[in-house]
Amino acid sequence: AYEQQLDAALAFMREGDRFLVVSHVQPDGDAISSTLVIGWLLRYFGKQATLINEGNVPVRLSFMEATSSIINFNQQPPSEVFDRIIAVDCADYRRIGTVSDAFDKGALLLNIDHHPTNDGFGAVNLIRTDAAATVEILYDLMERADIVPDNEVATAIYTGLLTDTGGFRYSNTTPRVMHVASRMLAEGVSGHWIANHLLERMTKPQLLLLQRGLNGLTFSEDNRIAWLYIAVADMTETGAIGDDLEGLVNYALNVEGVEVGILFKETDNGQVKVSMRSSGKVDVAAIAQLYGGGGHVRAAGCRLEESLQDAIPNLINAVRKVLVE
Ligand code: 5GP
Ligand code: MN
Ligand code: MN
C-alpha cells in the first residue's frame, strides 16, 4: 500500500548517512523543487545531502536561494562516489543523465516520482501516479512523518505544484493539490509573486523565440495536429537559452480543434527533442514511448536521431495513425 511505500522511503532516508539527490535532465520547477525539499528533509534527519543535476538550474528558479547549492555535474563532477541515491521526478533511470556516473556499483536508489510511465527502477520505489507533482508526494512524506515545512520548503512545494499544474489549470489540479497549496500559502508563501515571476513575465529572447516559433506554426489538413519547430539558428539569433522554450508547445495545443500540439527542437548535436501535448483524447506518452521517450497522457517527450526535416513528417505520421484509430 501507499503508506508502506511512504514508510519505506522514510526508513531509506533514516538508514544512510550520505546521500546524492538528483532529478531529471533539463530540470523543470517540480524537479528542482523536489531536489530542494529532499535536501532539506535529509538535513532535518541529520544526514549529509549532495544535490546534483546534469545541467544548470533554470535561471527563473534561482529565486529559491537553496538552488545555489545544486551542483552542475558537467561543470563540477564530484570526486566521491555515492552509495545512497534519491532520484526525484525521474520516470526512468535514463532521465538521471550523466549524474549516474557518480553512483557506486552497488548503490541503493530510492525512486520518488509521479509519472505513469515510471518503471520502478529503484531498490525502493515511492510512486503515486495521481499526484500532480513529485512535491505533492514529498508533502505526503512530511505529513506521514509529522514534519511541518518551513517557509523555504513551503515555497519549493508551492513552486513544484504551480509549475506541474500549469498554474493550477491542468486536469491534474485536484482537491488535494489545492489543499496542499493552501497550506503552503498559510505558511507564508508569496503565491502571487511566484506566479507572476514564473508564468507571466518573459525575457526578451523568450518573446523573440515565440515570434519565430509562431512563424513556423503548421496545421494538419484536419486541423487536429499543430506543430512548431525551433532550429539551432533560432536560439543563437534571438539569444535564447533552453529555459526560453518553456510553454512554447502550448501555443500549438491551445488552438480550438487541435488535439495534439508538438514542438520540435533541433539540438546542438543534430538530434531533435520532441515535446508533445494532448487535449486528452490521445495518449502522447504512448507515442513518445515508440521512440524511447515517455511522460504523461497529456504531456510527453522523446528524442529523434535525425534531422529536423526528417523528424517532423516521421513523428506527425505516427500521431496521424493514432488519431485515425
Ligand atoms: P517536456 O515536453 O516538457 O520536455 O516534457 C513533458 C513530459 O514528458 C514531462 O513530464 C517529462 O518528464 C516527459 N519527458 C520529456 N522528454 C522525455 C524523454 O525523453 N523521456 C521520458 N521518459 N520522458 C520524457
Ligand atoms: Mn519534471
Ligand atoms: Mn513532475
Image (cartoon, helix red, strand yellow):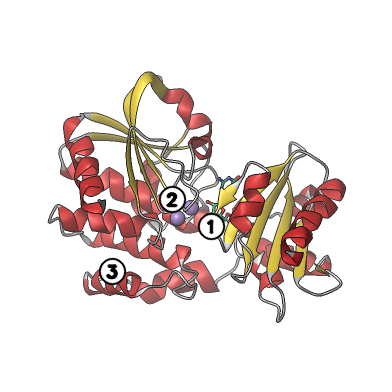
Q: Residue at x 20, y 29 (%)?
A: 17
Crowding near pointer 3: few (<14 within 10 Å), some, many (20+)? Answer: some
Q: Is mark 1 within 8 Å of ligand 1?
A: yes
Q: Residues within 10 Å of mark 2 (few under 14, many from 20)?
A: many
Q: Between marks 2 and 1, how big is the CA–CA gap?
A: 15 Å
Q: Nearer the viewer, mark 2 or mark 1?
A: 1
Of 322 and 125, the residue lying toward us = 322
- Residue 35 placement, left or right of 199: left
Q: Position of residue 134 (x, y in %)?
A: 38, 54
User: Disc 3, disc 2: CB below 8 Å?
Assistant: no
Residue 31: image tag: 2
103 to 315, vertically: above or below: above
Furthest toward the left, the residue is: 146
In the current view of this chain or complex, which residue is farthest to the bottom?
Answer: 256
Viewer-proximal residue, 216 or 127?
127
Residue 272 in view: yes
First in sequence, mark 3 or 1: give its number.
Answer: 3
Tally of numbered tags:
3
Could you say whether the residue bearing mark 2 is in a helix, strand or loop? Answer: helix
Q: Quadrant of residue 122?
A: top left
Q: Look at the numbered disc 3 and say if its residue's Cβ is closer than 8 Å to ligand 3.
A: no
**Percent of width and height locating residue 317:** 81, 56
Query: Within the image, what quadrant is residue 139 found in?
Result: bottom left
Q: Marks 3 and 2, how far apart in space?
A: 18 Å
In percent of width and height, residue 2 lies at 26, 52
Q: Secondary structure at mark 1?
A: loop
The residue identified by callout 3 is: 180
Of labels 2 and 1, earlier in sequence is 2
Q: Which residue corresponds to mark 1?
A: 296
Q: Is residue 249 left or right of residue 179?
A: right
The amino acid marked with disc number 3 is: Val
Taking the view exactly as shown, the residue that stands out farthest to the front is: 325
